[in-house]
Amino acid sequence: MRPVRRKISPHAARLRRDRTDAEDCFWQAVRNRQLDGGQHGEAKDARRTVFLEAKGFRILRFWNHDVLENLDGVLAVVSATLADSRT
């Protein structure tokens, strides 16, 4: 079976291509289900959160510093959130 190719918006493609060191570090850690998953403004984040939660997503936000300096703690929060969502 051939892999599914999803078409992404130019904005999403740019965000993936130009990700921060913290984003890269995080995605390296959670890629391929290995987890067993100061860039934003409050108003924009609030609108984005409302939109995504209306679509059924749960939003977790971490400071870049936390990802770079406390990746284990960030991954623990993600893991616990995933476990809670399965109950």
Image: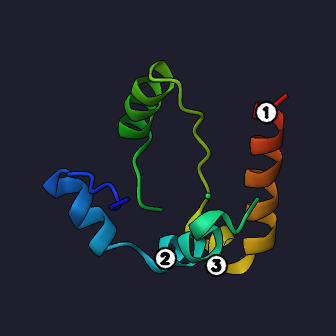
Circle 2 Cα neighbour tier, 10 Å, few/some/many (<14 / 14–19 / ≥20): some
- Colour treatment of the image: rainbow
Residue 85 x, y percent position in the rendering? 76, 32
Mark 3 belongs to which amino acid? Leu
Quadrant location of the C terminus in the rendered image: top right
9, 64: nearer the viewer: 9
Query: Seen in the image, is 55 located left or right of residue 17?
Result: right
Mark on residue 34? none
User: Upstream in the sequence, badge 1 or badge 3?
Assistant: 3
- Mark 1 touching mark 3, by CB under 8 A? no
Q: Residue furthest front?
A: 1
Q: CA distance from mark 1 to mark 3?
A: 28 Å
Q: Which residue is mark 3?
A: 68
Assign a secondary structure to mark 3: helix
Query: Seen in the image, is 22 located left or right of residue 62?
Result: left
Q: Residue at x 37, y 72 (%)?
A: 19
Q: Which residue is mark 2?
A: 24
19, 82: nearer the viewer: 82
Circle 3 Cα neighbour tier, 10 Å, few/some/many (<14 / 14–19 / ≥20): some
